[in-house]
Amino acid sequence: MPCTARDAAAAVRRGADAMAEHRDELVELDRAIGDGDHGENMDRGFRAVVAQLDLADPPTPGAVLKLVATSLISSVGGASGPLFGTAFLRAASSAGEVEELDGATLAASLRAAVEGVVSRGKAEPEDKTMIDALLPAVRAAEERATSGADPAEVLAAAAEAATTGARSTVPLIARKGRASYLGDRSAGHLDPGARSVALLLAAFADVTGVE
Ligand code: ADP
Ligand code: MG
């Protein structure tokens, strides 16, 4: 089943629930290698997203993604607000004004999202950032889309790869963001931004394509 604006909005709302449910966990992860605000940032950002969704009825999946981007950018400071904002903004541009996303156009949106984060944050793989979850997720999404998978299947593959990717950040030494100030002491901890990416994709996968 393709992904409509309604599916996209429902997915985003589920993502907001996940950020609220995991707020404390994300705070703890960021307390270990950052300043402890990541859970608050993501929860506040997605509350703002839901508030905007309650007011508007975006007509296309791209418009939903654009609303997410602008809400995150205006409500979240720190590193993650502009980075997640850019991800959703690029995904929105990629989705354009089509009424429905299929597996391939959804995978293309994910690819645009990761490219946006890389161009904004300049992180490379294994720098211990959200890229370590997002990039494998995009690759898995593209692979599934190539074999004709629908958005639900594409997102499920992306979510699974993101979870594995996030876990892979544990032994890494951070080379970008606040965690990099810790040097070697950043090793042994899960990157909070990578965890958020995995949680969001799992939440999106949970709802997309389900009426
Ligand atoms: P801040 O670091 O400003 O307190 P957050 O705590 O909300 O912001 O977000 C931290 C997360 O942002 C990190 O866990 C990491 O995944 C991500 N991050 C930080 N810098 C970069 C970057 N340059 N590129 C990609 N992701 C980054
Ligand atoms: Mg922080």
Image: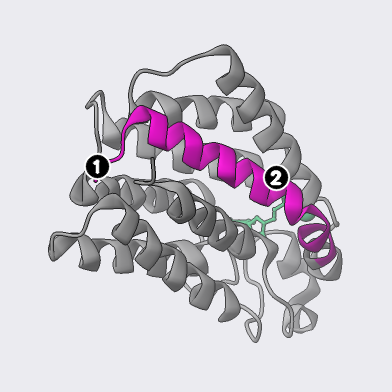
Furthest toward the left, the residue is 147
Task: Please state which amino acid type lies under the numbered disc 1.
Answer: Pro
Magenta highlight on residue 22: yes
Q: Which residues are magenta?
A: 1-28
Q: Looking at the rendering, which quadrant does residue 143 occupy?
A: bottom left
Looking at the picture, does residue 101 appear above or below residue 147? above
Q: Is residue 143 above or below residue 95?
A: below
Q: Looking at the picture, how far across and down is residue 149, in whole percent? A: 20, 59
The type of residue carrying mark 2 is Met
In this rendered view, identify the residue nearer to me: 124 or 49: 49
Q: Nearer the viewer, residue 196 or 160?
A: 160
Residue 193 vs residue 150, the one in the foreground = 150
The C terminus sits in image quarter: top left
Mark 2–mark 1 distance (CA, rounded to whole Å): 27 Å
Which residue is denoted by mark 2 in the rendering?
Answer: 42
Q: Residue shown at 50%/24% (left/top)? A: 67
Residue depicted at x 70% and y 45%: 42
- At mark 1, the secondary structure is loop
In this view, the residue farthest toward the top is 55
Is residue 135 depicted above or below 122 in this figure?
A: below
Residue 34 lies, in percent from the top left, at 80, 62
| 2 vs 1, front mark | 1
Residue 118: quarter of image: bottom left
Crowdedness near tag 2: few (<14), some (14–19) or many (≥20) residues, C-alpha within 10 Å: many
Main structural element of the magenta stretch: helix, strand or loop?
helix
- Visual colour scheme: one colour
Q: Give the mark nearer the N terminus: 2 vs 1.
A: 1
Determine the residue positioned at 78% across, 53% down.
23
Label 1 Cα neighbours within 10 Å, binned few <14 / some 14-19 / many ≥20:
some
Respond yes or no on whether mark 2 lies under 8 Å from ligand 1: yes
Q: Which mark is residue 133?
A: none
> Would you name the residue on which mark 1 appears?
2
